[in-house]
Image (tube, rainbow, N blue to C red):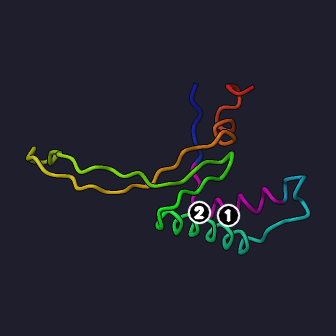
Amino acid sequence: MSTQSKKMNKTDFIAFMTEQGHNNKQSAHKTLTKADAEKALNWVLESIVSATEHHHSVNITGFGSFGIQSRKAREGRNPKTGAKMTIPAYEQPVFKAGSRLKEACNPTKHK
């Protein structure tokens, strides 16, 4: 059984963050304005980018971890011509979901 995912862009997500603050009973007295939510989100995202840029992994318990994975150089083929080509080594960002995020996506599997 698959469910259709609803896509959110950054603006939608910032609005969602401010609405959740208003709807969450535990933090109802701590609401964010959209401007504050955008600043907070930008700060967190830029901090994760900066940390990984400096080869640090970032682990947020329950949510997940961000890091870098090194890929070796390898031989490939040009999809248009079929000619052999070398794909150079590179580093790619990786994200591994944590337990709380996995449970939120699959609530019936974790009861």
Question: Mark 2 falls on what kind of element?
Answer: helix
Quarter holding the N terminus? top right
Please name whichever residue, 40 or 1, is drawn nearer the observer in this view of the structure: 40
- The residue identified by callout 2 is 10
User: What residue would you read off at disc 1?
Assistant: 14
Q: Residue at x 61, y 48 (%)?
A: 64
Q: Main secondary structure of the magenta part?
A: helix
Taking depth in this image into account, of 110 and 24 the one nearest to the observer is 110
104 displayed left or right of 74: right
The reply to whether discs 2 and 1 touch (Cβ–Cβ < 8 Å) is yes
Q: Position of residue 110 (x, y in %)?
A: 71, 27
Name the amino acid, label 1: Ile
Q: CA distance from mark 2 to mark 1?
A: 6 Å
Direction from residue 59 to residue 80 in the image, left or right: left
Q: Residues within 10 Å of mark 1 (few under 14, many from 20)?
A: many
Q: Is residue 18 magenta?
A: yes
* Residue 10 lies within the magenta run: yes
Q: Residue at x 54, y 66 (%)?
A: 51
Magenta stretch in the rendered image: 7-21
In the rendered structure, the answer to whether residue 30 lies left or right of residue 62 reads right
User: Which corner quadrant holds the C terminus?
Assistant: top right
Q: Is the residue marked by circle 2 packed among few (<14), some (14-19), or many (20+) residues within 10 Å? A: few
| Up/down of 79 relative to 107, above or below | below
Q: Which mark is residue 30?
A: none
Residue at image location 63% in from the left, 37% down from the top: 102
Q: Secondary structure at mark 1?
A: helix
Residue at (65, 53) in percent of width and height? 60
In this picture, is 44 found above or below 86? below
Where does residue 99 sit, x and y in percent of width and height? 66, 39
Amino acid type for the residue under numbered disc 2: Lys
